[in-house]
Image: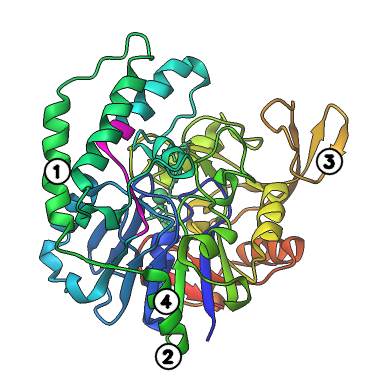
Amino acid sequence: MTVDLLLGLQWGDEGKGKIVDVLTSSYDIIARFQGGPNAGHTLEFEGNKHVLHTIPSGIFHPEAVNIIGNGVVIDPVIFKKEIENLAPYGINFSEKLLISKKAHLILPTHRLLDAASEAAKGKAKIGSTLKGIGPTYMDKTGRNGIRVGDIFAPNWDSKYKKLITKHLELLKNFEGFEVNDIYALEEEFLTSIKALKKFKLVDSENYLHQAQKAGKKILAEGAQGSLLDIDFGTYPFVTSSTTTAAGACTGLGIAPNKIKEVYGIFKAYTTRVGSGPFPTELFDDYGETMGRVGNEFGATTGRSRRCGWLDLVALKYAIKINGVTQLMMMKGDVLSGFDKIKVCTAYQTATGIQDYFPFDITDEQIKPIYEELAGWEEDLTKMTAETEFPQNFIRYINYLENALETPIKIVSVGPDRAQTIHR
Ligand code: GDP
Ligand code: IMO
Ligand code: MG
């Protein structure tokens, strides 16, 4: 039995949460493979809007099992709040939500280290979500981290105290950074750890291997986006995990030869939250309209997202790295009323025209080369079939499929679960 993957092809916030929720009815298991509460995955259905940070986006389907994989980093404080927010839905968590014992824990001092490190960088800051993601993955690769399974270990107290003490020492190196009320933070953390103990902690790779053997259908859910990948993203303005397809192998224990479909999600334009290069970024009315109509505010931090035209150089790069087999295009509805639509087909760099994503995009002076397509006036949000689409929107879709050499199988025309058109 095979596993399908769903991941973002841009700088995150492509609409992964919405599509995972839409697809869950065809799967038995939804498994998050990396990232942590830096993610904000928005789901809308039946008049409800919900933002998930750590919990997989299949959680509203009572028949599906949701797994938080070993590649995820968990802040028990945020996790507890997420669970509390879900109380009205009567979800059977003990049966439907499993957590890998190997997932790493975000301590309150990881969050402080994130804040201190960003403050020390000044203007060069990453623009992190300040959720402690970088320091937690550093402790994981530095072999100092604490894992979810450790909360039941006899030496939990000493492990935890040792790491907190180490972090507090490290924090002294950040001049001018003050640690306020560490006791309150610790109390909140330890209360949340108690709450975490009530959940089902599993060897999720083993669970998934058995599920595969039993013929269960599994969908792996990515967080962030390919251009935020620690290796392939716009380094150093990236997150600290493998957001690309390989992350599903390491973050869930799924063998590469078991992966079948790779669903790549992108917006009909581009957004980015936080610092870092963004060649097609707009500072004009078009960008302003994308942000306003698209309601482009971070689901986790509330920061406004930078907006720009679609970048095919970046998208082709992401499709290759992930081995995308099917595309899903989100938010085409936001572009209704634009008199023209531009897409970047190549970059003009100091050394000439380039159609490959450059190594040091951060330092390169890049001028995007655009192709211009006709816009459309019609409101797409109430359309329920492809046959209702305006001609110029169909032309945009066909143009992209051609350029990207990959079929666009889902077109999303609004945030609601129902505003989804399968092709
Ligand atoms: P994720 O992190 O990839 O799950 O995406 P986010 O939830 O952070 O951001 C996507 C935003 O766009 C959310 O507010 C969604 O409700 C919204 N959204 C998703 N698909 C569409 C769409 O097709 N049209 C519009 N207008 N909004 C959408
Ligand atoms: P979802 O899953 C968009 C960005 C941050 C920052 C950089 C590093 O909702 O698509 P971090 O806190 O990870 O150290 O921040 O990555 N970032 C995201 N941007 N969507 C996300 O997740 C993001 N998670 C992190 O803004 O630029
Ligand atoms: Mg998001």
Mark identifier at residue 208:
4
Q: What amino acid is labelled 1 in the image?
A: Leu
Between 367 and 262, the residue placed more toward the observer is 262
Label 2 neighbour load within 10 Å: few <14, some 14-19, many 20+: few
Q: Rounded to the nearest whole Å, what is the CA distance between mark 3 and mark 4?
A: 42 Å
Magenta span includes 246: no
Tell me how far mark 1 sits from mark 2, CA to CA.
38 Å
Which is nearer the N-term, disc 2 or disc 3? Answer: 2
Instruction: Point out the tag, 1 or 2, that comes first from the N-terminus.
Output: 1
The one nearer the camera, 369 or 172, is 172
Check disc 3 and report the residue beneath it: 354
* Foreground: disc 2 or disc 3: 2
Quick check: is 105 in the magenta stretch? yes
| Label 3 or label 1, whichever comes before in sequence order | 1
Cα–Cα span, label 1 and label 4: 30 Å
Q: Residue at x 50, y 16 (%)?
A: 123
Label 3 to label 1, Cα distance in Å?
A: 52 Å
> Which residue is at a point 11% across and 62% down the rendered structure image?
87
Image quadrant containing the C terminus: bottom right
The amino acid type of the residue labelled 2 equals Ala
The magenta stretch is 102-110
Using the image, determine if residue 26 lies above or below residue 270.
Answer: below
**Which label sits on residue 190?**
1
